[in-house]
Image (cartoon, helix red, strand yellow):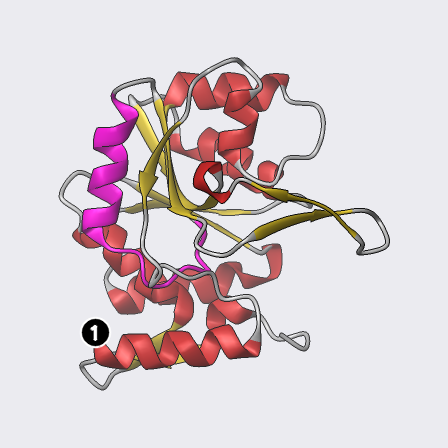
Amino acid sequence: MGGADKLWAPLEGSDGTTRPLLSYALRAFESCARIDSIVLVAAPDAADRAEALVRDERIAKVCAIVPGGARRQDSVRAGLAALGACEWVVVHDGARPLVTPELIERGLEAARETGASCCALPASDTVKESDENGIALRTLDRSRIWLAQTPQVFRYDLLVDAHRRCEGDATDDASMVETLGVKVRLYEGSRRNLKVTTPEDLELARTLLRAT
């Protein structure tokens, strides 16, 4: 993103109103009937901006705004501590602005089976494994490959235990829970639920939001 903070990139919605990218995910959780409380984990230097966003967008379910840590898992751990004990917790990346209440609710239903669920997409492209030099080693069976997204849903005590016991770096919370031997139920997400990582992603999100 050329040094720009993608979470605050302006995006125009279908109603013609321009809002920061982060606000769209917040609004989805705010409008989901099965979500009671929201903890917003923000960069330490963005606390004032986050507070203003919550106030201006009237996100009433936000119960705390806390600073994130050096790693993704440190930020999630800070959010768990601020949330406090409850039955279920839904972890979502604010850089996915097109999440919907329906996607959140399906994650909660899927998690009831094992205590954990992960929104994901079945791979549609051929998947290659390479060596460190970019040379293809083998072609993987894409029928068994899923591309993880968020939301990811967990029993609160299960996720807290995973964070307590995981010592290495983790790319998502589902992988941490998997190390405990817990089965994570994958449920099909949406190609619209993209993660904004590059300027091209940002333009695609703008197009999709205008068409929503």
The x, y position of residue 88, in whole percent, is: 30, 26
- In front: 6, or 171? 171
Of the 4 image quadrants, the one containing the N terminus is bottom right
Residue marked by disc 1: 212
Q: Residue at x 39, y 33 (%)?
A: 83
The x, y position of residue 38, in whole percent, is: 32, 44
In this picture, residue 72 sits left or right of residue 99? right
- Residue type highlighted by circle 1: Thr
In this picture, residue 92 sits left or right of residue 128? left
**Image height of 171 relative to 156, above or below:** below
Task: Categorize mark 1 by other alpha carbons within 10 Å: few (<14), some (14-19), many (20+).
Answer: few
The x, y position of residue 84, in whole percent, is: 39, 26
User: Is residue 9 visible from the viewing direction of this image?
Assistant: no
Q: Residue at x 36, y 59 (%)?
A: 193
Magenta stretch: give its range.
93-112
The x, y position of residue 165, in whole percent, is: 62, 16
Q: Is residue 104 magenta?
A: yes
Q: How many marks?
A: 1
**Image height of 13 relative to 62, above or below:** below
Q: Quadrant of residue 50?
A: bottom left
User: Is residue 79 visible from the viewing direction of this image?
Assistant: yes
Of the 4 image quadrants, the one containing the C terminus is bottom left
Q: Residue at x 60, y 55 (%)?
A: 44
Q: Quadrant of residue 73?
A: top right
